[in-house]
């Protein structure tokens, strides 16, 4: 196997070294195994070497490190090449420091607007145990990556917000190891998101990196879901040397559950059991149970909640009871004057505590899979979650690469978060155009989502809804394939209407399904006051909230809100030098967490809405 890899590696390097290499080939999958189809679940339940901390970096705007030109610069995979008599024009030992996790934009002034290729390197000591396999796990990094360990390319990954992992058993050495990662945040038309989106294109190893050991045959994945009949159905999946016909077991001591069995020819054990006296997870009772999974060589545990979510006509039912999703939208950006993507447990807690402070029972984690930390905390805090992949507005719906990336992101997101009771909605897209290609594209993705997880609801944030005589009608054909249809509406902000004129509007729909207002709001510069007729004032934003919340109150099929947005956030598309300065100012709190006038109104509306249900 090793010799095969060496040959294929040589061929691949040789090919990529040809002069005038077609840079589009940069995204070709190098012929290397090692990249796992999906990352083993439950990172936080594993004993890992966390590689957070100081790494070195090299900026490579001309992408030379990816190729072995005929002479001169060597392949950057090599940690710190021996100078000797060859001309070597890079050396990580003489390169500047950068922190991981973190985006390069808010760490290095010269890289604030950088979009391109950047190389990371760190070394670490390890003592690989021969009767184990060894996994290199990335929580997430934006956008395209190629990973090398001890100068051997392991493989690549595309997508900025989901985990990926490599089996490094063959490449890991005793003692010092050198990890080199090429990260490229260049926007490309076929990527997801595409060339244009309304958040900052933070690049880099934005989430943590870990190394951990597993038995030769290890626990890859497990899923548990409470069924309508009160049973819990699930599966345990093994990976590694001999995953089939293996003894596995699952225990929930608090429920007196201990199921055991053997994996099938696919390495999977499927089970079902009916617990007695189950305390169901709900925002008012975020009950989590300690679940233990065992196979011959390892035991994993994590806290998991059990609840059901479904729709009935225009109602959303949580554990069989109608529920109104009263919350707000959140981007994954640190609260503070610099912003930035690196979410530690403290920063995740700070964001979700702001959501709880509004009295919310719900949060839209926009526009991409947030850190696993956010989902674990939502479980603990009792926040229902809308989770989504970054299919945002215009995409190349007729490009097969785009579908493949979307499909991969959905799989990685559902794989990682299947056991999070807080996730009640998977959203497939945001404000995508109502074309035939888009409908075909999204229907296939929805089918895939339902095949991966039929225990949750599927939605999408729709815009361009049809207005006839001040009544908006949801006529988007995508609605037919959704469990919940959601609308983004900015009447009174985009377009000529005043906040007061929202009072003349109504919503109706051709779908007898629950609806949520997935976005509404207005920009306001914190501390800028004036008449309610003056845009960009806190007073204007307050008027928009007052009028739109009234609109929600008179919309009979409304079953949720996630106004846009909790906190002002960085965006390259918000150019006004006084009101915005490259910040989207629709937050009800500004970037340092100071509440605007609309905050109190929203807080009392949400608090009343949640209390009505308890
Ligand atoms: C859109 C979009 C958001 C964007 C917001 C805005 O609806 O979904 O990503 O930030 O509107 O215009 O501020």
Image (tube, grey):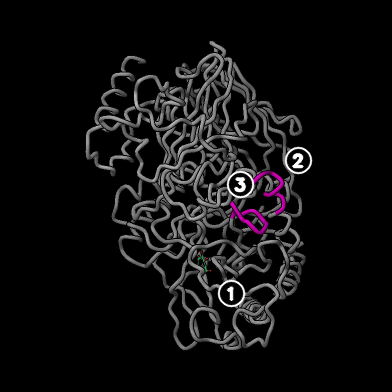
**Precedes in sequence: disc 3 or disc 1:** 3
Asked whether the viewer can see residue 234, the reply is no
**Which residue is nearer to you in this view: 109 or 167?**
109
Q: Is residue 330 magenta?
A: no
Q: Mark 3 and mark 2 in contact? Answer it, CB < 8 Å.
A: no
Which residue has dot 3 on it?
A: 342
**Percent of width and height locating residue 376:** 66, 44
Residue, x 29% and y 52% (percent of image)? 399
What label does residue 277 carry, if any? 2
313 on left or right of 65: right
What label does residue 531 carry, if any? none
Cα distance, mark 2 to mark 1? Answer: 58 Å
**Percent of width and height locating residue 144:** 42, 43
Q: Mark 2 and mark 1 in contact? Answer it, CB < 8 Å.
A: no
Which residue has dot 1 on it?
A: 578
Secondary structure beneath label 1: loop
Looking at the picture, does residue 521 appear above or below residue 82? below
Q: Residue furthest left?
A: 19
**Percent of width and height locating residue 140:** 52, 41
**Precedes in sequence: disc 3 or disc 2:** 2
Secondary structure beneath label 3: loop
**Which residue is nearer to you in this view: 566 or 527?**
527
Asked whether the viewer can see residue 220, the reply is yes
């Amino acid at each position: 196997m090793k010799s095969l890899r060496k040959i294929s590696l040589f061929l691949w390097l040789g090919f990529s070294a040809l002069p005038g290499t077609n840079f589009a080939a940069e995204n070709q999958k190098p012929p290397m195994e090692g990249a796992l189809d999906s990352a083993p679940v439950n990172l936080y339940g594993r004993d890992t070497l966390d590689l957070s901390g100081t790494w070195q970096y090299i900026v490579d705007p001309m992408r030379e490190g990816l190729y072995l030109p005929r002479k001169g610069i060597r392949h950057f995979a090599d940690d710190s090449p021996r100078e000797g008599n060859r001309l070597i024009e890079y050396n990580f030992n003489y390169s500047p420091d950068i922190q991981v996790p973190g985006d390069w934009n808010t760490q290095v002034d010269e890289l604030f607007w950088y979009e391109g290729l950047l190389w990371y390197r760190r070394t670490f000591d390890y003592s690989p145990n021969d009767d184990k396999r060894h996994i290199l796990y990335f929580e997430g990094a934006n956008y395209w990556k190629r990973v090398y360990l001890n100068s051997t390319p392991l493989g690549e990954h595309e997508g900025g917000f989901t985990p990926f992992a490599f089996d490094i058993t063959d490449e890991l050495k005793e003692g010092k190891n050198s990890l080199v990662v090429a990260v490229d945040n260049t926007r490309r038309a076929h990527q997801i998101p595409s060339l244009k989106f309304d958040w900052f294109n933070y690049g880099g190893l934005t989430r943590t990196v870990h190394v951990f050991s597993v038995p030769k045959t290890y626990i890859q994945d497990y899923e548990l879901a409470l069924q309508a009949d009160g049973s819990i159905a699930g599966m345990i999946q093994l990976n590694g040397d001999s995953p089939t016909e293996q003894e596995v077991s699952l225990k929930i001591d608090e429920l007196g559950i201990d199921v055991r069995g053997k994996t099938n020819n696919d390495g999977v054990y499927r089970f079902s059991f009916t617990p007695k006296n189950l305390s169901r997870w709900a925002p008012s009772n975020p009950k989590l149970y300690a679940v233990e999974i065992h196979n011959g060589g390892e035991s994993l545990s994590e806290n998991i909640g059990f609840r059901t979510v479904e729709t009935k006509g225009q109602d959303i039912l949580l554990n069989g009871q109608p529920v109104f999703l009263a919350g707000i939208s959140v981007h994954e950006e640190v609260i503070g004057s610099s912003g930035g993507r690196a979410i530690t447990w403290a920063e995740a807690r700070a964001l979700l505590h702001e959501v709880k402070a509004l009295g919310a029972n719900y949060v839209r984690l926009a526009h991409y899979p947030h850190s696993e930390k956010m989902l674990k905390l939502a479980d603990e805090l009792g926040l229902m979650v809308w989770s989504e992949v970054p299919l945002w507005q215009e995409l190349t719906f007729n490009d097969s690469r785009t579908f493949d990336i979307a499909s991969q992101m959905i799989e990685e997101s559902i794989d990682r978060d299947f056991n999070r009771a807080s996730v009640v909605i998977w959203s497939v897209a945001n404000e995508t155009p109502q074309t035939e290609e888009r409908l075909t594209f999204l229907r296939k993705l929805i089918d895939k989502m339902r095949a991966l997880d039929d225990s949750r609801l599927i939605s999408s944030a729709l815009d361009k809804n049809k207005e006839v005589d001040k009544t908006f009608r949801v006529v988007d054909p995508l609605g037919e394939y959704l469990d919940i249809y959601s609308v983004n509406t900015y009447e009174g902000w985009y377009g000529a209407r005043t906040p007061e004129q929202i009072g003349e509007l109504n919503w109706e729909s051709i779908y007898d399904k629950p609806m949520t207002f997935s976005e509404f709001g207005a920009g306001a510069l914190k501390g800028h006051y004036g008449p309610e007729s003056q845009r960009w004032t806190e007073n204007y934003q307050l008027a928009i909230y007052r009028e739109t919340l009234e609109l929600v109150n008179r919309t009979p099929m409304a079953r949720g809100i996630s106004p846009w947005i909790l906190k002002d956030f960085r965006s390259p598309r918000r150019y006004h030098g006084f009101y915005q300065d490259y910040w989207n100012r629709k937050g009800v709190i500004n970037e340092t967490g100071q509440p605007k006038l609309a905050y109190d109104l929203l807080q009392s509306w949400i608090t009343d809405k949640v209390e009505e249900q308890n």
